[in-house]
């Protein structure tokens, strides 16, 4: 994927009201194993984040506060329902994208994917599970939380 696509995706996410009300097929993953998504199937599937409340603004504040304190994370954009964050690896400066979509029912659909490479050696899955743990969400379906 070229560099301009990484700038166009966040813009499209923020400008399109379609993203706010429909299943978001764009949150599915490519066939490469360097991505996890709550809307993917098979091995790339990961449980959505779940909150006891349906206060989307409260959920957004909690997510932003958590992400702002993570090393190597930069929040690129956020609106009422979508948060886009990029993570940069310290040594090789690889970039991974995290997209969070806050739903009115208190769930948050997630997608974490590497921009380059084929394998991520579980990095994106661990990132989501680390976020889940930081938020106190107990809905993990992953036994490999480390």
Image (cartoon, rainbow, N blue to C red):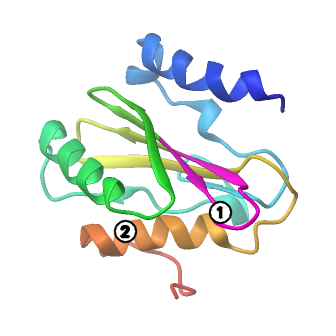
User: Closer to the observer: label 1 or label 2?
Assistant: 1
Q: Does residue 61 belong to the magenta stretch?
A: no
Q: Quadrant of the N terminus?
A: top right
Residue tagged 2? 132
Q: Position of residue 126 (x, y in %)?
A: 56, 73
State how far apart marks 1 and 2 are (Cα). Answer: 20 Å
Indicate which disc residue 146 carries: none
Judged left or right of residue 67, residue 123 is right
Q: Position of residue 52 (x, y in %)?
A: 15, 59
Judged left or right of residue 52, residue 73 is right
Give yes or no for contact between labels 1 and 2 (Cβ–Cβ under 8 Å). Answer: no
Q: How many marks?
A: 2
Q: Residues within 10 Å of mark 1 (few under 14, many from 20)?
A: few
Along the line of sight, the residue nearer the viewer: 93 or 86: 93
Report the residue at 20% width, 53% height from top: 62
Quick check: 9 above or below 112? above
Judged left or right of residue 35, residue 49 is left
Quick check: 34 above or below 103? below
Label 2: which secondary element: helix
Report the residue at 32% width, 61% height from top: 69
Report the residue at 51% width, 59% height from top: 72
Q: Residues within 10 Å of mark 2 (few under 14, many from 20)?
A: some
Magenta region, residue range: 85-98
Q: Does residue 94 belong to the magenta stretch?
A: yes
Q: Position of residue 87 (x, y in %)?
A: 56, 54
Quick check: 60 above or below 52? above
Q: Position of residue 26 (x, y in %)?
A: 63, 31
Q: Earlier in the sequence, mark 1 or mark 2?
A: 1
Residue tagged 1? 89
Which quadrant would residue 8 be assigned to in this image?
Answer: top right
Residue lying at the far front in this picture: please name it. Answer: 91
Judged left or right of residue 79, residue 120 is right
């Amino acid at each position: 994927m070229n560099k301009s696509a990484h700038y166009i995706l966040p813009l499209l996410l923020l400008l399109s009201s379609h993203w706010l009300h429909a299943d978001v097929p764009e949150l599915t993953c490519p066939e490469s194993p360097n991505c996890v998504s709550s809307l993917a199937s098979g091995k790339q599937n990961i449980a959505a984040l779940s909150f006891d409340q349906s206060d989307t603004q409260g959920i957004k504040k909690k997510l932003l506060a958590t992400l702002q304190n993570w090393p190597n994370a930069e929040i690129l954009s956020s609106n009422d329902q979508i948060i886009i964050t990029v993570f940069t690896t310290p040594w090789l400066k690889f970039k991974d994208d995290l997209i969070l979509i806050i739903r009115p029912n208190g769930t948050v659909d997630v997608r974490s994917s590497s921009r380059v490479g084929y394998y991520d050696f579980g990095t994106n899955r661990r990132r989501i599970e680390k976020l889940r743990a930081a938020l106190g969400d107990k809905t993990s379906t992953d036994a490999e939380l480390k």
